[in-house]
Image (spheres, grey):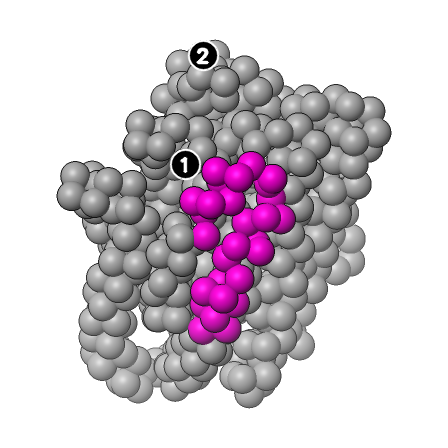
Amino acid sequence: MSKTSAQDLGSQPIGALLIKQAVPASIGILVMSLNILVDTIFVGHWIGSTAIAAINVVLPVSFFIAALGMSIGIGGSSIISRALGASDAIKALKTFGNQITLTLLLTITLVILGLWYIDAIIPAFGGKGAIFEPAKIYYRIVLYGVPILALSMMGNTVIRAEGKPKFAMYAMMIPSVSNLILDYIFINLLDFGMEGAAWATTISYGLCFIFILWFFISKHSELKINFSHFGLNFPIVKEIASLGFVTLSRQAVVSITYLLMNNILYDLGGETSVTSYAIVGRMLMFAMFPVLGVTQGFLPIAGFNYGAQNYTRVRETINTAIKYASILATLVFIVLMVFPGAITKMFTTNLEVISQTPNAMRWVFAATPIIAVQLIGAAYFQAIGKAKPALLLTLSRQGFFFIPLIFILPIYYGEMGVWMSFPISDVLSTLLTAYFLNREIVKTLKQEPVIDSIS
């Protein structure tokens, strides 16, 4: 990270700085989400609605393994941001080297296990009946590229921690654009079906990795590591693990949620309900891109200024991020409440799915305007290195509230109870986060730091 970038994070006006960090992150997430969205549309129209359900079965498995890279990336990037804020370049370099080693060791091990137990994993995640075979085809091919995806996700967070959000945006755009082009070639022109969809995804991961590798060996990155940095350092690994475990736990709960939802909905409404959930899930990834962009932009600013003990700027960053994210979330809410039917028809021509999905979509996004508090609050604790509250708040929505609700409410309301669980868990987790965040601001951020004059 250049001195100019460090000074930017610690001195530029928060509003302008947050926009500068959040816009590239939002664009990157938008393009990545559009890729998932359009990919689903292509698969639905060129292969069939069952293929959408098949991909939805595979996603939680591949995403969980890839999320190891993101977890290690976010955990390590928190350390890197704070180390750069404290002018400790040696720790930043050692952390980055340890991130690479951990990502490779863990993801390759899990890919081997995932391929070995393929016939048990797919049915467990809802790949039953007509969904099983296309899911198995897609799963096997995509899993080959997951270690590369994990390295890319890890590297992307480090690029952002260096204060280079535009390069992080490019890294997210490359696989998204290439995947769509390859989808058209492999599925529509060459008629490779599910194999074509899978290879398009896997090859796009590789192109993303090539770009990120180029960034770190070029003059654009200040993190020039050598072989000595790859050796695992226990204190650093422990800190990466404690902070990264927050992200990994969130993704683990997401994967468990997919497993439960696919099975519960299959029992309640068959393949149609699983497909409806797949469409709503794609919209969850796509529609929230501006809010997630603000959250991503918030992380390095909060982490750097906390490391520099500039608590006034940290408080201002929290308030500004929540305000921006809330406005954007409300706009998303309005669009999805008004046009759920038109959105559903983009994905499929199946009349049953078209009839069922809009109502589900309205329920799922009913509490969207308030979720900014939950997202920014949980991200804050992770950015400043407080793993326990970050873990608690990250898991609160799905782990503590949503999963119990999807078992309880369907007893009384059937399939509608599943969809009702979304806004209820959003409200409860937001209230919990607001309590902890307010307590942190009062106890910590309103205190001026005691500066030790002895270096």
Secondary structure of the residue carrying numbered label 1: helix
Q: Which residues are magenta?
A: 330-358
**Is 289 covered by the magenta stretch?**
no
Which sits in the foreground, 215 or 436? Answer: 436
Q: Is residue 263 above or below residue 136?
A: below
- The residue located at (62%, 75%) in the rendering is 20
Q: Is residue 31 visible?
A: yes
Quick check: 328 above or below 229?
Answer: below
Is residue 70 at all visible to an observer of this figure?
Answer: no
Q: Rounded to the nearest whole Å, what is the CA distance between mark 2 and mark 1?
A: 23 Å
Q: Which residue is mark 1?
A: 273
**Which numbered disc covers residue 119?**
2
Pinpoint residue 413: horizontal percent, then vertical percent.
Answer: 21, 45
Q: Tell me where residue 389 appears, x and y as whole percent.
A: 25, 59
Check the picture and name the quadrant holding the C terminus: bottom left
Q: Quadrant of the N terminus?
A: bottom right
